[in-house]
Structure formats: structure tokens, C-alpha cells
Image: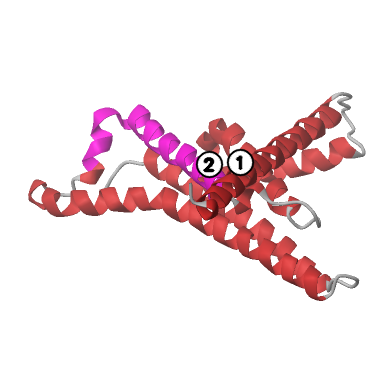
Amino acid sequence: MNPVLFFESHWLHEHHLVVVMYTLFVMGMLALFSFLATRRMNILPGGFQNVMEVIVGGLENLLVETMGPEGRKFFPLIATLGLYILTSNLLGLIPGFESPTANLNTTVSMAIVVFLMTHIVGIKVHGIKYVKQFMGPVWWLTPLMMPIEIISHLSRPLSLSVRLFGNIMGEDIVLAVVLLLVPLLVPLPVFALMIFTSVIQTLVFMLLAMMYIAGAMEEAH
């Protein structure tokens, strides 16, 4: 067996295991935060409960403003994606840690979930009529419109996954270079920019997911 191929295969296997471990770590953190925020619920929240209520309330307001009141039933999905992506993005800013979202497998899996949910909701709301949106406004345009619509819908998970993966991977590379060049004094503006980018990428993924699902519930024109 070629030693180079064996080394690359072994490295990829080990890297995927590391990503899985970081993913489980993020899931454990979120589960712990949920437990700490809800173990002693008070009418007048204080401390950690107050922080978590502000975060969850902000996510709910964003969901309602984007999808309307009927979008509340998708809150568990959208909030879970948002909290997981944000925590994963920020984890990579800690030296020695790696963002699970800097791995394409992670971002693709989330994008596929959104893609499947979009069409499941569309079929559930409109029934077989949901397929008509792929055929265009008149029947004689179907041979032209159907390939365009199919490619457009298939590009959504590709866009969601590659955008998030590329930005977070870029952040991790920049952080590694900065730590290598100035290990004793990491410029704070770089960290501030990375935190801002992590939040923005989380919002972009959430907003696109909400828009896709909301679009599937609307009547085709």
C-alpha cells in the first residue's frame, strides 16, 4: 500500500473522529446550559436563567418577524440550529479547539435537514399541488422551467453548507496564523472581527432556513 495514501487516509480518519468529539462536546455544553437554566425556574428570572431567556426570546422574535406567527411550530428546529452553529463557531476561537462547523460534513448534514424539511412542509401544506411550482406558470414552459427550478432548489443546501464551512474554516486558519506570528499578544480586533463573523454566519444560516421553509408554505404564483 502506498505510504502516502495510508497516511492521508489515517489522518482523515483521525480528523473526523476529532470533529465528532467536538460535536459531542458542543451538544454536551448546550444540554448543560439548558439544565442550568431550567432546574430552578423563577417568575422573576435571575442570573443564568435570565441570560438564556433573553437568547431564546430573541430567537423567537426573529422567527416570528421572518416567518410570521405560524412559524412558531418550527422554533425547536431553528433555535437548535442557531444555538448549535453559534456555539460551534465560537468554540474555534479558543486556542486548541476546533469548530465543528469548519468541517464540511457538519454543515452539509444541517443543510440537508433544512432541505428535507422545506419540501416535507411544502407537500404537507399543499399536497400534490406543491409539485406545480416546478413546472412554471403555463404547461408549455415546463420543459424549460423544471430543470431551472430543480437546480435552484438543489443549490440551496450547497450554498448553505459551503458558505458556513468556508467562512468558519477561514476564521480558524486566520486564527492559527495570528497565533503563530504573535503568540504572546493576539490582537483583540482580530478576535472581535471573528466573533462578529461567527454571529453573522449563524444569522445567515437561520434566516435562509426560515425563508426556505416559509416559501414552501406560501402559495405558488
Percent of width and height locating residue 123: 33, 31
Are there few (<14), some (14-19), or many (20+) residues within 10 Å of tag 1?
A: some
Q: Earlier in the sequence, mark 2 or mark 1?
A: 1
The residue shown at (59%, 45%) is 10
Secondary structure beneath label 2: helix
Question: Which residues are drawn in magenta?
Answer: 104-132
Give the left or right position of residue 176, taking residue 10 as reference: right
Percent of width and height locating residue 87: 72, 46
Give the residue number, with chain letter if any, for mark 1: 81
Give the left or right position of residue 123, taking residue 136 as reference: right
Would you place residue 206 above or below residue 32 in this image? below
Verify CB contact (< 8 Å) between mark 2 and mark 1: yes
- Give 185 or 211, whichever is nearer the viewer: 185
Q: Amino acid under label 1?
A: Leu
Q: Amino acid under label 2?
A: Met
Residue 134 visible in the shown view: yes
Give the residue number, with chain letter if any, for mark 2: 110
Would you place residue 109 above or below residue 141 in this image? above
Q: Specify whether residue 50 is painted magenta.
A: no
Secondary structure beneath label 1: helix
The residue shown at (89%, 27%) is 42
Percent of width and height locating residue 170: 62, 65
Q: Specify whether residue 120 is painted magenta.
A: yes
Percent of width and height locating residue 122: 36, 35
